[in-house]
Image: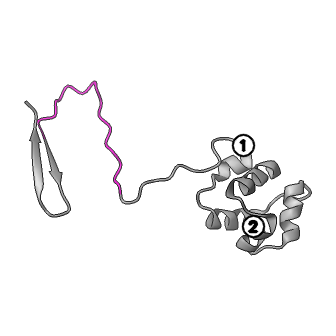
Amino acid sequence: MNTRLLRFLEAENITQSQFADALGITRATVSHILSGRNRPGFEFLESLALRYPELNLEWLITGRGRMNREKQPENVPPVPTVSLSNPRKVAKIVVFYDDNSFEELTAH
């Protein structure tokens, strides 16, 4: 984990001192974690998750996945899935716009 944390610091272009200050921990704590002398505790990981929400903690802890989490678009509802085995066909789609107008699209 210490090598992945070092890769994160390099990717963020921040020093160990800046990192320690951002998390509100001592520089010695960061140094000991990066050297492999100490393992980070829950409070460290919690502070890290709150300060750097884009960091994928699963990657940091296990090495699985990508360093950064996929950014989720804000206020966008999930797209419904369409089953191709469904015998029903779409007949009409209604699109509502933010100016309270709408448009009906019908299948031909």
Q: Name the side, left or right, on which 96 lies relative to 67.
A: left
Q: Nearer the viewer, residue 13 or 50?
A: 13
User: Dot 1 lies on which element?
Assistant: loop
Which label sits in the foreground, 1 or 2? Answer: 2
- Foreground residue among 72 and 99: 99
User: Pointer 1 and pointer 2: residues touching (CB < 8 Å)?
Assistant: no
Residue identified by numbered label 2: 19
Q: CA distance from mark 1 to mark 2?
A: 20 Å
Residue 59 on image: x %, y %:
68, 47
Range of residues picked out in magenta:
76-92
Residue drawn at x 89%, y 54% is: 36
In the displayed structure, 24 sits above or below 44; it is below
Is residue 52 found left or right of 15 in the rendered image?
left
Give the image location of residue 43, x and y in percent: 73, 68
Q: Main secondary structure of the magenta part?
A: loop
Q: Residue 14 lies in magenta, yes or no?
A: no
Residue type beneath disc 1: Gly
Location of residue 51 by image quarter: bottom right
What's the residue at 11%, 42% (across, down)? 105
Which residue: 71% across, 62% down?
A: 45
Does 89 sit above or below residue 32?
above
